[in-house]
């Protein structure tokens, strides 16, 4: 992927070093400027850059002012911040850029680490490809409405990601995830239809179809001798519907599945509406022995306030705080404090986004109960997951006999 990159730093040596590094990585269209004002001028004059790498500590217009100005200018490319300051300052700058909704790729300390820079740019390229794919694969309003109306026989396909018990190494549960089987474009990811469902206020109807399919599959696995817990995502605002809890009860009665095998993952991409009704429904679920999980804890509206208001049984730590955390003292401290908080509240802890052995080892050492992530297993269609489950169980029995669990993907 050919990229145009702008590097902003008041030290000529740093500019030269970063440019040489980028060129050696194959990115030859690299421009450098020594002040934020020069960078702003180029952006204002219509120069298009895929990625801007900006030092935080510069005279006159510093990096924080630069971030605010490029946000006001609606810059849509990737942004990497650079500084010789301590890690917490860098982290705070990154969080601010995210608040601005800038496409922040990460932060680099000085001297720069080539591997980190490569990973950040690779992440940008991957996101760009996904964005291009998303714009070309979104379904139409009519397709969405027809698919929901078709219910369980419609185009929604279920994928399942394994949830591993860290201490035993056993697959004790799954997270149910939806995909859309399009007649001409094949299997489409969630971003092809979820945002549209939210926009058209059809997300609750869509979620009900997903829930019913997931509970039916849970029943089948139990009949096959696999008593796993299935986690299913609901927007917290879905629970403003006073009939939702009754719908959930009815589905479990239909398939004869005990509530203890269903875990409701509550997501909060938006602030809670009709708080009283939402909390009432969630408490009813807990009274009937459903598990309640606060999803993506530490991001969005998934906060300490919700832990106080809602009787959650499980806390899912967002992948942002798990993946590659072993290389950051700040990330480790945040993980450790989150795990300790959850334990004091009597909650189980799930670490999402474990993609390396280092991620697994860290969350195991900090006391997490379960782990999800590509290091253990990616989301899979039902038949593929069942094969994975058989292989995993066979492997884990051998590993357990030698007290030496080995993870395979």
Image: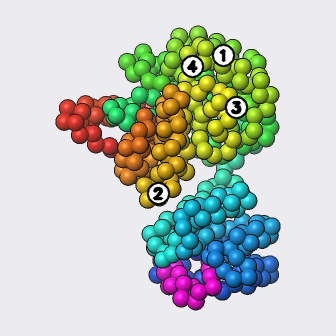
Q: Nearer the viewer, residue 28 or 55?
A: 55
Residue 53: image location, x then y, percent: 61, 74
Pick whichever of labels 1 and 2 is earlier in the sequence. Answer: 1
Q: CA distance from mark 1 to mark 2?
A: 40 Å
Q: Are marks 2 and 3 in contact (CB under 8 Å)?
A: no
Q: Which residue is mark 3?
A: 236
Q: Which residue is mark 4?
A: 290
Give the answer, above or below, for where 264 lies relative to 77. above
Q: Secondary structure at mark 2?
A: helix
At 75% across and 38% down in the image, what residue appears? Answer: 271
Q: Secondary structure at mark 1?
A: helix
Q: Give the mark toward the camera: 1 or 2.
A: 2
Residue 284: mark in rendering:
1
Q: Nearer the viewer, residue 87 or 226?
A: 87
Q: Which residue is mark 2?
A: 329
Q: Which residues are magenta?
A: 5-22
């Amino acid at each position: 992927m050919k990229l145009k990159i702008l590097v902003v730093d008041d030290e000529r040596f740093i500019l030269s070093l970063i440019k040489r590094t980028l060129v050696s990585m194959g990115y030859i269209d690299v421009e450098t400027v020594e002040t934020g004002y020069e960078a702003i001028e180029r952006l204002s004059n219509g120069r298009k850059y895929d990625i801007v790498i900006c030092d935080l500590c510069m005279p006159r217009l510093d990096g924080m002012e630069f971030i605010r100005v490029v946000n006001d200018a609606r810059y849509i490319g990737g942004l990497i911040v650079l500084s010789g300051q301590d890690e917490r300052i860098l982290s705070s700058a990154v969080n601010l850029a995210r608040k601005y909704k800038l496409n922040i790729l990460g932060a680099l300390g000085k001297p720069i680490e080539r591997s980190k820079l490569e990973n950040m740019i690779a992440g940008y390229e991957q996101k760009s490809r996904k964005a291009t794919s998303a714009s070309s694969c979104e379904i139409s309003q009519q397709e969405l409405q027809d698919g929901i109306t078709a219910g369980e026989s419609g185009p929604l396909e279920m994928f399942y990601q394994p949830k591993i018990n860290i201490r035993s190494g056993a697959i004790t549960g799954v997270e149910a995830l939806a995909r859309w089987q399009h007649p001409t474009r094949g299997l489409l990811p969630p971003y092809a239809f979820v945002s549209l469902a939210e926009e058209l206020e059809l997300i609750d109807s869509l979620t009900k179809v997903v829930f019913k399919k997931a509970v039916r599959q849970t029943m089948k696995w139990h009949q096959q001798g696999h008593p796993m817990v299935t986690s299913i995502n609901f927007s917290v605002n879905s629970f403003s519907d006073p009939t939702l809890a009754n719908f959930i009860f009815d589905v479990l009665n239909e398939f004869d599945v005990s509530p203890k095998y269903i875990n409701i993952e509550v997501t909060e991409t938006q602030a809670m509406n009709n708080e009283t009704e939402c909390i009432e429904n969630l408490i009813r679920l807990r009274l009937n022995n459903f598990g309640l999980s606060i999803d993506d804890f530490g991001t969005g509206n998934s906060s300490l306030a919700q832990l106080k208001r809602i009787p959650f049984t499980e806390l899912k730590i967002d992948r942002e705080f798990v993946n590659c955390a072993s290389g950051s003292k700040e990330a480790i401290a945040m993980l450790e404090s989150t795990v300790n908080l959850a334990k004091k509240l009597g909650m189980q802890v799930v670490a999402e986004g474990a993609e390396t052995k280092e991620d697994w080892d860290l969350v195991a050492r900090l006391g997490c109960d379960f782990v999800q992530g590509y290091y253990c297993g990616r989301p899979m269609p039902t038949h593929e997951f069942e094969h994975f489950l058989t292989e995993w169980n066979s492997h884990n029995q051998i590993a357990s006999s030698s007290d030496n669990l080995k993870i395979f993907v």
